[in-house]
Image: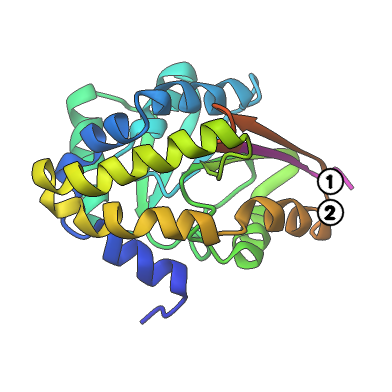
Amino acid sequence: MDTHPGTVLAHRFFAGTGASYDTVVKLFTLGCDVWWKKRIVDAIPKDASYIVDQACGTGILTFKIARRFPSCRVTGVELRDEYLNIAKEKARALRLKNVDFLLGKAEDVRVDGPVDCITSSYLAKYAELRSLIRNAKAMLRPGGLLVMHDFACPKDPWFARFWAFYLQILQTVGPKFFPEWKTVFDELPCFLRQTTWLTELPEVLQENGFSPVRTETLTCGASALVTATKSAD
């Protein structure tokens, strides 16, 4: 059994939440998730023929990629079978022929490459970053792109106060409407304050020969997008 703290936390946070995930992620982010995922898709190389979406969840980002790149193969990798089963059902309903899915941990699942681009949203804070980046490096072609997005802590004092107040509201009101998310509403704010993924990830990428590595903060610092290119050497 995997005992990495991030993996254990992800299992505990998301058990039994698959059916309401799509609704909660829109509400929780005040609709910003739609824009954030568009930024991820916009970063993907236009000539990509094979893309892997790690921690794909119910397939929200996976399907956006598949629609934008209809001639491209898109593989979604997801830790929890509850979420993966929902994603598969959605893919059948949408009649998407260029999507497939694999069950497993992003740090471990390795597809037959080469892969042109690897994406993820909300994975970085849970991941063992060194293992994750080594695995990504092994799958990406020379010059391939890694695109990672996740929550961050706002630096602007005014927005940081607003964000903290909003999270407190979620802790109070959220469980009344979505009781299966109580653990997330209770514990995620503290976890976000403690996570160091945004400073660690660029360092790990540079250690593994990715260049350039670019970091962009989104929505007043409530989230961040990191892109990195695998060395062509």
The kind of secondary structure element at disc 1 is loop
Q: Kindly check if marks 2 and 1 are in contact, taking CB atoms under 8 A apart as contact.
A: yes
Q: Can residue 69 be seen in this view?
A: yes
In percent of the image, x 51 and y 66: which residue is there? 108
- Which residue is more in the foreground, 45 or 141? 45
- Which residue is more in the foreground, 147 or 125? 125
Spot occupied by residue 33 in the image (x, y as percentages of width and height): 41, 29
Pointer 2: what residue?
209
Rendered position, 165 above or below 220: below
Left or right placement of residue 4 versus residue 118 in this view: left
Pointer 1: what residue?
231
Q: Residue 9 sits in which quadrant?
A: bottom left
Describe the colour scheme in one phrase: rainbow
Rendered position, 48 above or below 181: above
Crowd class of label 1 (few under 14; some 14 to 19; many from 20; radius 10 Å): some
Spot occupied by residue 62 in the image (x, y as percentages of width and height): 40, 33
Rendered position, 32 above or below 184: above
Q: In which quarter of the image is the N terminus?
A: bottom left
- Which residue is more in the foreground, 232 or 34? 34
In percent of the image, x 52 and y 56: which residue is there? 193
Left or right placement of residue 169 versus residue 215 in this view: left
Query: Which residue type does callout 1 highlight?
Result: Ser
Q: Give the range drawn in magenta.
A: 225-233
Left or right placement of residue 27 versus residue 8 in this view: left
Q: Can residue 66 be seen in this view?
A: no
Real-space Cα separation, disc 2 to disc 1, in angstroms:
6 Å
In percent of the image, x 47 and y 76: which residue is there? 4
